[in-house]
Structures are given as C-alpha cells and as structure tokens.
Image (cartoon, rainbow, N blue to C red):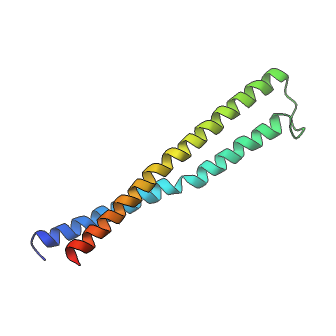
Amino acid sequence: MDGITGRSTRDLRKNAQKLHFIRAELLSYHPYLVELSRSVEFTLDTFGGTEGGAALDSKAVEILKAECKKLTVEIERLDESRITPAERLGNVIDLVKRASFFIYG
C-alpha cells in the first residue's frame, strides 16, 4: 500500500474526517440558536407588556417589538443557512464512503 492506492486511502480518510468535523460544527450551532430565540421571546414577553412585567412607554414597546421581530427573522435565517451546508456535507461524506468502498473494497 505504499503506492498511489495507499496514499489515496489515507487522503480519503483524512478528508472524510475533516468533513465530519465541519458537519458537526454546523450542527452544533442549533442549540445556541434555539436558546437565543427563547431569550428574544422572553425579552419580548417581559418588556413587551404581555406578562405585565416591567412597564415601558408605548414608543419603547414599539421599538422593542420591531427589534425582536428582526432578531427572530435573523435567527431563523441563520438556522436555515446552517441546515443546507450540513445536508450537502452529509451527501459528500456518503459519496466519499461509497467511493472508498468501491475502490478499496
């Protein structure tokens, strides 16, 4: 296995490991985005007047609601933009595994 076959096998395994690492990193952001979303909801509920928490004037409540809506949209966008690359990496990892199995048995 000193020739091209040995080197190719090592390269495939190294690349597959790197792809797994990148995919795991992408998937690990989801819990943080969920927590951030909950924090935005809590802030809106507490200071937006739905739970009778801290009293703010109507102008401040309008601004708070608008900013919380923008944050929620951005959090959703980040979550969706995280999913597609993770799925694509999964597909590539599967192709690398199949190619490795096909070439090397």
Q: Is residue 5 left or right of residue 39?
A: left
Q: Is residue 56 above or below residue 4?
A: above
Question: Based on the displayed image, in which of its 4 quarters is residue 21 positioned?
Answer: bottom left
The quadrant the N terminus occupies is bottom left
Q: Residue furthest right?
A: 52
x and y percentages locating residue 31 in the rendered image: 60, 55
The quadrant the C terminus occupies is bottom left
Q: Is residue 93 left or right of residue 80?
A: left
Q: Is residue 34 above or below residue 47?
A: below
Question: Based on the displayed image, in which of its 4 quarters is residue 5 positioned?
Answer: bottom left
Residue at 46% over, 60% down: 24
Q: Is residue 30 above or below residue 73?
A: below
Residue at 85% over, 23% down: 57
Residue at 66% over, 50% down: 35
Residue at 29% over, 61% down: 15
x and y percentages locating residue 48 in the rendered image: 81, 34
Q: Is residue 96 left or right of residue 61?
A: left
Q: Residue furthest top?
A: 59
x and y percentages locating residue 40 in the rendered image: 70, 41
x and y percentages locating residue 44 in the rendered image: 77, 37
Question: Based on the displayed image, in which of its 4 quarters is residue 62 positioned?
Answer: top right
How many numbered discs sit on the rendered protein?
A: 0
